[in-house]
Amino acid sequence: MDCCGLLTAQKEPVPLKSVEVELQVRDHVATVVSTLNYENKEDKPLEAVFVFPLPGDAAVCHFSATIGQTQIVAEVKKKKQAREEYDDALSSGQQAFLLEESDQSPDIFSLSVGSLPPGESASIRLEYVTELAVQADDGLRFCLPAVLNPRYQPQGSEGASVQVTSVPASLVPYSLSFSARVSSPRPVSKVESNCSLDPLQYLNTEQTQATVKLAAGHKFDRDVEVLIYYKDAHQPTAVVEAGQASAKPGSLMGDPVVMLSLYPEFPQDVMSSLASCGEFVFLLDRSGSMDCPMNNSKRDQTRIGSARDTLLLLLKSLPMGCYFNIYSFGSEYEHIFPKSVEYSEKTMEEALKKVEKMDADLGGTEILEPLQHIHSQPCIPNQPRQLFVFTDGEVCNTKEVISLVKKNSGSHRCFSFGIGEGASSALINGLAKEGGGHAQFITGADRMQPKVMQSLRFSLQPAVEDISVTWDLPKGVSVTVLSPPITAIFQGQRSLVYAQLSGQSSAAAEGCVMVKYSLAGHPSQNQLHFSLTPAQDTGLTVHRLAARTLIRSLETENDEDRGEPDEGVKKKVVELSVQSGVSCAFTSFIAVNKDNSEVVQGPLVRRDVPTSMYFCSAMMGSAPMVPMACCMMQSDVLEMAYEDDEVEFNDDNEDVSPTASSDEGFSVGEVQVAVPKQPPRDPLLQLVSLQKASGCWLLDPALAAALGKTSEEVENTKPSAVNQEVWATILALIWLRGFKVDAQEEWELLAMKAASWLRAQNAPCVTECVEAGNALLGCNMQKDALGL
């Protein structure tokens, strides 16, 4: 069955025919050029409106339209003025083009193509620049958002929600081509993607330049994620970019701008001693969309199921002596304990029992209220608060949520996780950036657990305090830092600083920047020397990224007071936006074809261009399966069309249509829809679930089964001088090291806790135990490898 979709304008002609994307990556900065080709095949003039996602930290810096041989380059103007010019042009029969950033979220844009006459074609060029985020495995992540899910409108909130026309990937009526060119001072070791790529092509023998393309046949059921890996990635760099010749000296665009990429390295002895205290607060999304599968091509686990498994690992890995609590939210929120409790065997087991029962059954996505409640709780002395937020991130009040986290950033660090396709990059990145933490995205075939455990490692690092950045520049050169102050530093993670340089210097002049901070009570510093000679062929990329950084910083400050925008701040933001050519919340790109002598005749017909929406689907049983949409909208009933049949869902994402049947599935007309069964539990998670809060395991039949042995085999091989808990714990460690080394990131922290517990027991015959355990399990582990 190939006809399905939300009841939108699915049968109307779509004038957008193709999208071409060219990605240019230079080290860790990306320039993206998107060309959207429109054609009006109808007999009446059209206005095409396309609402689509962009990376939340993108700096949109160019917008133009080509009609025939005529190119019209858009200007950045105040949003109200641009809208009035667009409406005036359309009412007078002129062609006009408008690009606007959403008021609610900086990762959603609306493109209006006005007065496209019958038979006419138009090509729209959109260009933006963005920094590439560093992942836990040192890969640089670029994401081309193809999926835009409807954003949940919080109850009682003011303002219109973002109106999105969405269809399943199979019904998206336009094609996508994607190519990337990568260049860096360091060799490119590999490029990976969640989508099929043609083989990587190196352009020189040093392998510092390469190209890659998206393989033919790509479907719009996922964002295009590209991971770029360099050799020796942790190298601090500085890029100085010359100012724009036509700009006024002393202005941001007229002066040189430097972009510093800093990688502080911490002493090994400090990093090996992870913190044994902290208040760990986990906030889990339980809205209906969390019932979607993690991977659309592999439907054996849902997002909520993966989140439950992840919470199991997190709770087992926490240090004794810390405090914790778990919140979950949808249209309302719940918490396991009235306030954070001390971590013990009793509290851990109580929490795990409740986690096992958590489903995606709480309706919408009201994330603001539980965050407000968490921040209203007094902090526990000497227990730094660490907040972990798990969500598929589809809310309209993004700026309000981020503003709340920033307001409370002095009392906590926030680690955020965007789950599945279409998660808002503005929300996920904004929470981590303003909360002094780290953001992770889990898409495609990614496993949630290793990424979350990496963030837990970050949270257990000592908090870096008293961070300062000082400059040593030649006489006559001054610096104005454009980036917000650095509030968080993690081992191996990049910190970016933009600064404007004023004054004159000699051709061979050098500057130096020094980052000072206190780590675990010890003063540390890192410094970087750099040439003040401007780099070649950078265009104005660094200036635009610097302008975007300053604009976002001013907007965030303005958002902290949710009343009317401060006119002084707004004026400064608008001036900066117009000067740099980078759009913002208060400005838009406007282009009017004033050279067109022919007035477009007749009333305009609006056509909403659909975007791809992530759809859950069932694939079990022999009957044809019907793709099912997740309940991601606020409306009481989400309707989907299957030719002449309809299925209805209530707020809990339950089927309420007359033909619904048992747990085994239900019928839609003559089509049987199956409900996926729960997959068997992962052996690793089975073993982890048996570990005690202290770090040890008990010798019982459940442990023997998890190790793949009988109770008699496990008990009869135990050295007589060793107690049962020590023997059981050594066996568990041998099994982890011997059979699950590929998942070490997931179990390493709980294994360290187990090894610490063993050392504290001062048990005799540990070497004999390890030898006996190796013989039983068929391994060859050394005592030192187990941390003993």
Image (spheres, rainbow, N blue to C red):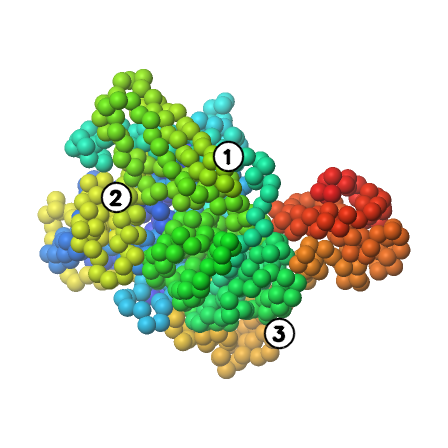
Image point (28%, 56%), residue name: 559
Q: Amino acid at mark 3?
A: Glu
**Image position of 421 with respect to 125: above or below:** below
Question: In front: mark 1 or mark 3?
Answer: 1
User: Is 92 left, or right, of 68 in this rendering?
Assistant: left
**Could you tell me if the residues under marks 3 and 2 are in contact, i.e. CB atoms within 8 Å?**
no
Pick the front one: 708 or 325: 325
Q: What is the crowding at mark 2: few (fewer than 14 residues within 10 Å), some, or many (at least 20)?
A: many
Q: Report which residue position mark 3 lands on.
A: 664
Among the two numbered marks 3 and 2 on one chain, the one whose residue lies closer to the N terminus? 2
Alpha carbon separation for disc pair 3 and 2: 53 Å
Please tell me whether mark 3 or mark 2 is closer to you in this view.
2
Q: Residue at x 28, y 52 (%)?
A: 557
CA gap between label 2 and label 1 equals 34 Å
Whether residue 169 sits left or right of residue 741 in the image: it is: left
Q: Which mark is residue 323?
A: none
Q: Nearer the viewer, mark 2 or mark 1?
A: 1
Instruction: List the residue tagged with mark 2.
Output: 582
Q: Earlier in the sequence, mark 1 or mark 3?
A: 1
User: Which kind of residue does numbered mark 1 sit on?
Assistant: Glu
Instruction: Tell me the quarter of the picture where residue 93 sits.
Output: bottom left
Report the residue marked by disc 1: 265
Q: Amino acid at mark 2?
A: Val
- Front-most of 97 and 534? 534
The residue sitting at 42% across, 29% down in the picture is 527
